[in-house]
Amino acid sequence: MICILLVAGHGTVLETQIKNDDTGLYGHLTGVPKALLPGIGGKKILDFWWETVNMRQLFTEVYLVTNADKYKHFERWATANDFPVENVVNDGSTTLEDQLGAVADLELVIRSRKLQDDIMVIAGDMLCADQNFDIAQVIRFFRSKPGELAIYYELEEGEKSSSRGIVEVCPDTHRITRFLEKPQEGLTASRLASVVFYCLRKNTLPCLSEFLSLQPQAQDRSFGQFWEWLINEKQLHVFGMKLPTGFQLIGQVGLSDYTKWLTHYSAKKQGNPAKPITCRSYARAGLMGNPSDGFHGKTIAMTISNFWAEVTLVESQILVLLPHPLNDPTEFGSLQDLFCISRKEGYLGGLRLLQATCKKFYQFCSKQGIALTKQNFTLKYDTNIPRQVGLAGSSAIVSATLKCLMKFYNITDSDLPKPIRANFILNVETDELFITAGLQDRVVQVYEGLVYMDFSKQLMEERGYGEYVSIDMKNLPTFWLAYLSDPSDSGRIHSNVRQRWLSGEPLVVEAMKTFAELTDQARTALEEGDWTRLAQLMDQNFELRRSVYTDDCLGPGNLKMVQLARQFGSAVKLPGSGGAVVGLCLDQERLVEMRQAFQEAGCVFCTIIPYDPSASAASSQQEPHHD
């Protein structure tokens, strides 16, 4: 592949304003080409692009196209920056009036140097929020698609779509369906702006001269018009890849815009390393319907702020995943210490969850056509969610890690919508780590709060996710949670329910339908504040689960906790896969007695503090810096 950097524009507006500026601050920039103006951190704008594409393993050659007026500046820059001077091409123009036009400049290099390879073309005078992105990822995406490639970004607040070439992109195929050069307001809802950063296949290169023969005027030879023609007239496939960063084409702006954007991007750049990103995800309790989420059923679950996983990301020189001192021990007091810890905790801490999430995130972005910046980071995690008691501790770590990565790389909700995010988290665990899991935990941890979920077969097959509805959390009754301090015997016996369901056993198929019906009734009870009815439904949920899974599978520890709760007249069920129980006790006096009884039985007992995402960030349930 060959890379061509275009720097032949005549920046008359900016150049004139620098010349006429009477503050004296910009006198030293008089006559300096746009691409050689200072970028972020004082480096020249072109320096960043040269650093990005100066990779012999990716490009056989890199060319620079300039004009006669500024040729000497770029010749001097080339010798100072180890750029081959013979690859600086002069288009012969000296003014805006005799310029060739961007497409003609590109065609000039290809024709004069007899190039017959795939081409990457970049405007070397673009100011970019972070030019240190993964160019290899862009090339891989281009190679994976049967067509051309155009890079786009999401317009920042305040940027008008009428000032840019706007693209409409099919989210499934990533194909650009429309290219509109500086569209009038209301012509498109898209906020995706194309920049001069393209990949062209060698078979498409003859189209350049054909286009130019139809456009004798230089002002009609912009890339925007070329892509419009290529898509509409030639019916060629052009695909889009997103860079999650901002761009400004310096050739189109005046001095105030240039200084404003430079300050804006520099502040972004400087603000990044100083601020660690910390995100939390919460444990969840399944209140109704589980375990039918893996069987196209319906469930209701709630995030609880008693227990959480927290991940912190800090920008760093190299990528580092820090082991947790308790959950990922590598040092032990003795062999006996190692034996005791390994027997109780197992061998698999949270580090593998961080690593698998990072791997899957890069894979997802590559597949979705999102080119990431080449920034490194250090990740560490902490969690107080008890292990092996079915409160979704693993997925909380994955969820919090994903939040950090999205924030760090500026991945938005439109890039990774909530329902897809839940699927992503599940795939990290099932595909990468072979953890048996269902969607319920991940959905409620992404949406947060009290969530009704319908995983009907039709919805899952048609669009890949279910129907997820948040339920108002105001005036909820007091739920409680108890779990085994040593959950080793809970739910360890292998369940054959999935096989029975797949083979169509009437008892199991009917049970899953009943779980869904109970969930719908529970949703009504929650919305109407009918706590007595909700308590009855929770008990029914447990009995149904018991009839399908059998006491042997549920395990003596779980059954003991259920029995104990019932002695105090409390509704009770399993909130997850086993090891804990969740209950609803409407008699506050009996709740105190029950707490003591559970504690005396060697269990941990706590009153649930629901996590409500709509509550104020300053509330006592959530520290201000947490997500």
Image (cartoon, rainbow, N blue to C red):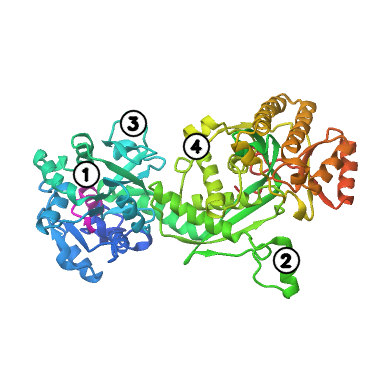
Q: CA distance from mark 3 to mark 1?
A: 19 Å
**Which residue, as the protein is rendered here, is positioned at the far bottom?**
334
Q: Earlier in the sequence, mark 3 or mark 4?
A: 3
Quadrant of the rendered image containing residue 477: top right
Query: Between tags 3 and 4, which lies in front?
Result: 4
Does the image show residue 624? no
Membership of 550 in magenta stretch: no
| Residue at position x 61%, y 65% in the image | 323
Q: Identify residue for label 3.
A: 188
User: Mark 1 falls on what kind of element?
Assistant: helix
> What amino acid type should be assigned to the residue bearing mark 1?
Phe
Position of residue 158 relative to residue 15, above or below, is above
User: Mark 2 falls on what kind of element?
Assistant: helix
> What amino acid type should be assigned to the residue bearing mark 3?
Thr
Q: Position of residue 497 (x, y in %)?
A: 66, 40
Report the magenta residues as a range.
1-19
Q: Identify residue for label 1.
A: 223
> What amino acid type should be assigned to the residue bearing mark 2?
Ile
Q: CA distance from mark 1 to mark 4?
A: 37 Å
Label 2: how many residues lie within 10 Å, few (<14), some (14-19) or many (20+)?
Answer: some
Q: Of 346 and 384, which appears nearest the observer?
A: 346
Q: Earlier in the sequence, mark 2 or mark 1?
A: 1
Q: Assess whether mark 2 and mark 4 are in contact (beta carbons under 8 angstroms).
A: no
User: Mark 3 falls on what kind of element?
Assistant: loop
Does the image show residue 188? yes
Q: Position of residue 85 (x, y in %)?
A: 17, 67
Q: Earlier in the sequence, mark 3 or mark 2?
A: 3
| Residue at position x 35%, y 62% in the image | 42
Q: Identify residue for label 4.
A: 464
Q: Of 168 and 391, which appears nearest the observer?
A: 391
Q: CA distance from mark 3 to mark 2?
A: 60 Å
Q: Identify residue for label 2.
A: 341
